[in-house]
Image (cartoon, helix red, strand yellow):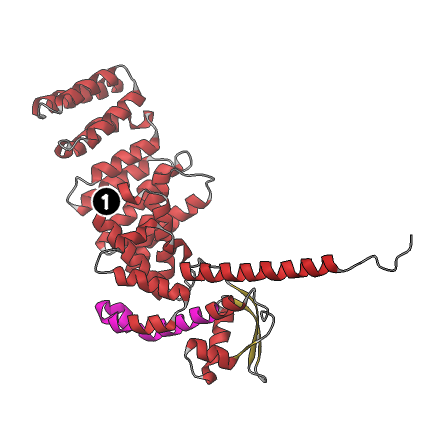
Amino acid sequence: MSAMDVDHHRVDVYLEDALNNAPPTLRPFFQRFRTLYDQKRWHQLTLAVNEFLADSDSGPFQVDLFNRFVRDFEGKINQLRLAEMGVKVCRQIEDPQKTLGLLTSLLVRINVETSPEAHILLLSTLAKVKLLFGDLEGTKADVDKCEQVLDSLDSVEGGVNAAFYRVAADYYAAKVEYGPYYKNSLLYLACINPETDLDAAERLSRAHDLAIAALLGDTIYNFGELLMHPILDSLNGSEYEWIRDLLFVFNSGNIGKFEVFATQFNREPILAVNHTFLRQKICLMALIETVFQRKGRADKERPIGFQTIAEETRLPQDEVEHLVMKALSLKLIRGTLDQVSEQAHISWVQPRVLGRDQIEQLAVRLNDWTERLGRVETFVASQDLFAGVTA
């Protein structure tokens, strides 16, 4: 008997056994598997297996199906679809070591050169399992390998990107690194539909963690992408709604409102612990707002005095210079300091998303600009520019 005949016999034995032990609702699947396998219709067989894996009654049979049936023809089907099957099946395994074993074995059988997306998906899933184990070092190693492969590709399926960005975000959350978490979590959300791919509890948790990361990230001073993202609406009506409101307070640089919200920081202990940092951050945001408000006005070219900044940020005047230097170093503004005259010459401010009040103020300034332009146009029109010119 040839090796092919042995494999076919092994598949026949498995399918016969499955037909005898499966509940009536699943038996048509195994009958269809036999027909498609005999006909070597691998694409249709892939679709049928995925349909089976999506059936709520198939859980107890999935691992056996994957190991004893799919394994026989895995080289004949799309390798990314194969990897997706492996990821689904491993959710049925309670023993973490066996989960790692299945994923690792499958990863070895997939060629990274010819099937890079399948490799990334499996490696990302392995990283997720290791993270659940608390193996941060192993997780980081797998995340780094995934990133190297991703960087070499021009395009990747959304589900593959989502798997990578999710585990990367979860890793940085475990490491309490707010900036990388914020970036990878937003990229993860860009790869999925939060309304359909996440349940209400997951949306609330993700929105909460993103808001905290935005507030505590020492490199995050532009909340625009988060403020516009529907995920933030998950906080409405929840116990964390005040944190959403706090984000908008920071975006507007409103120190008065910040001080009101600061009385609630005990509701979120991590904010209370970082009160000093948050106070410095709101001062930087207030400085940005002060500069922004001057742009477009008639006095935009005039320097801003330290006293004005002190009043807007509610800081002692002798701390203003350090604040401006901090803003310059973070590239939130561009300009120069005149320490002798205690003035700041600001030529540029970091673009950001405007709130309703800020948009209304911008509209007023645009109207003012239009009126001044109209007056100039009227003045020019009233002048006889050709007076005294002879033909």
Residue extent of the magenta highlight: 262-288
Q: Residue at x 25, y 70 (%)?
A: 264
Question: Is residue 383 among the parts visible in the rendering?
Answer: yes
Q: Which x, y percent locates residue 158?
A: 37, 39
In this view, the residue in front, 48 or 307, is: 307
Q: Residue visible at 38% across and 37% down?
A: 157
Whether residue 175 is visible, yes or no, is: no
Q: Nearer the viewer, residue 20 or 223?
A: 223
> Vertical placement of 119 versus 328: above or below?
above
Relative to 256, is 353 on the left or the right? right
Q: Main secondary structure of the magenta part?
A: helix
Give residue 105's quadrant in the image: top left
> Is 270 part of what is drawn in magenta?
yes
Magenta span contains residue 341: no
Secondary structure found at label 1: helix
Residue at image location 29% in from the left, 17% down from the top: 40
- Per the image, the residue denoted by label 1 is 100
**Front-most of residues 164 and 263:** 263
The percent coordinates of residue 302 (x first, y second) are 60, 74
Determine whether 310 is above or below 278 in the image. below
Q: Is residue 131 left or right of residue 152?
A: left
Q: Position of residue 18 (x, y in %)?
A: 12, 24
Position of the N terminus by quadrant: top left
**Picture quadrant of residue 44:** top left
